[in-house]
Image (spheres, rainbow, N blue to C red):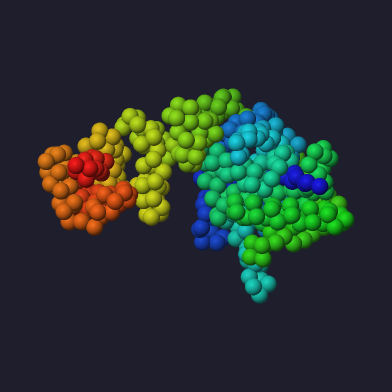
Amino acid sequence: MKYEAVIGLEIHIQLRTRTKLFCSCPNEYGAEPNTNVCPVCLGLPGALPVLNMEAVRLGLLAALALNAKVYKRSQFYRKNYFYPDLPKGYQITQYVGSLATDGSLTFEHHGVVRTVRIERMNIEEEAAKSYHAEDGTVLLDFNRSGIPLLETVTRPDLRSPSEARHFLELLRRTMRYIGVSSCDMEKGELRADANISVRPVGSEEFGTKVELKNLNSFKAVEEGLTYEYNRQIEVLKNGGKIIQETRLWDEHLRETRSMRVKEEAHDYRYFPEPDLMVLELPDGMLEEAEAALPELPEARRKRFISEYGLRPDIAEVMVQERDIADYFEDLAARIGDSSLAANWISTDVMRVMNEMKTDIHGFPIPIDDLAELLKMLKKGLITHNIARTVFDKMVAGEGTAKEIIEREQLLPLSDESELLGFVEEAISANPEIVEKYRKGKVSVIGVLVGYVMKKTRGKANAKRVKELLEEKLKA
Ligand SMILES: [Zn+2]
């Protein structure tokens, strides 16, 4: 029997606001523990929350980007439970009366178009961060307490671990495009829990689901779900039953283990937050958010393929970050050649960015200068090898393309008689190679081409050199 996975995700995205959701403490990562705190986010008696409308604006942008239905009126509730990282004894969140529901995100996975439905999107507050020391001590940092979160819950529409990863990567990219969050998983700005069950392929019924936690990276999402998928199939094949439980993914042991068995649903005793009014979107706020929405990554990827004729894999690389996509379109327009622009960005530009651990804003060559170099290459004024050499010198800050080429006399050898001199030299200096060539091993001509390229310091046109060599050797 063949099984398929049924996966749903519950995602938490930290919204990139200046201040926290209900107080004016800074929303920043990495500050000295317990310094960005006040009576509101410490849950002191009598402190009153005031809603940060910037968080609402970002939530609206996210909801629109996921084609969700946004409600003009929504409400905050108290979700009651006790845990040391929750100083008030309740979390302020949205419950009935979400900010938005019924969204979707469509993507292509291994050539198949997939749509994942979004059930709901709620604004809520973060808990504090707890650190568990080895001796059992628990330390709490309330800097995180009260940071705005966007809870995004999907329907169980994902059918494989790799699809779940792909979806989450596109969701992250989308959120970064619209500027609502950096979604850095290492900093906990994007977190995902998963529900997974398995069922025989073709079956409409759902199996018993297991909740999977501690998926702290894209790799963990895919690996944890794959492990769980195989574990559940193994249990069923051996005649066992899946128990509804919460399991933790252990990245070091590379397995999931049971955390708690759900005996019954939690009773969170939800009730409307009495210290906050019903959230009614001010006139024009939704329309403004709609107008501010940029072209989204999936639409842009498709356009790059149809408008510029990019290969699908190159288009995927070009839309990874909005800034890279913008840079690509700018560079392509300047040099009038989109595939040349995409090729240089996806190889040399990205290589330098990786080496320098910077983004496109920190890339050392001004776009004007790079365009000038690529235009010279496009016109055939310089060879590809020379362009590479000049590019590296530009990265090292040795000047513009024109300056470097003039200073180092890198313009190509266009004088045929001069070129012929090098070709003749190559032939007379390599008698054994010439003999091999004449005996039919034509591939050795590469050695002679290499000789000329070395002697001319890469300034010769390799194709022309080969032609001249062939003429001479056949004569
Ligand atoms: Zn505060």
| Place of residue 359 in the rendered image (x, y in percent of width and height, measured from the top left) | 41, 47
Total marks placed: 0
Identify the residue at image location x=15%, y=51%: 425
Q: Residue at x 60, y 31 (%)?
A: 64
Q: Which residue reaches farthest front? A: 439
Position of 420 with respect to 433 (left or right) is left
Q: Is residue 467 visible?
A: yes
Viewer-nearest residue: 264 or 233: 233
Task: Work out whether residue 55 or residue 228 is closer to the camera in this orientation and state it.
Answer: 228
* Residue 211 image point, x, y percent: 75, 52
Task: Please give the name of the residue rendered at 70% of the width and 56% of the height, measured from the top-left corner.
Answer: 227
Residue 118 horizontal/vertical position (percent):
68, 36
In the figure, 443 relative to 97: above or below?
A: below
Say which quarter of the image contains residue 119: top right
Apparent side of residue 454 relative to residue 81 in the rendered image (left or right): left
Residue 373 visible in rendering = no
In the picture, the quarter occupied by the C terminus is top left
Asked whether 334 or 416 is in front, the reply is: 416
Rendering coords of residue 222 (x, y %): 64, 51
Nearest to the observer: residue 63 or residue 403: 403
- Residue located at (75% from left, 45% from top): 4
Q: Is residue 137 above or below residue 63?
A: below
Which quadrant of the figure has residue 143?
bottom right
Left or right, 395 with respect to 416, comes to: right
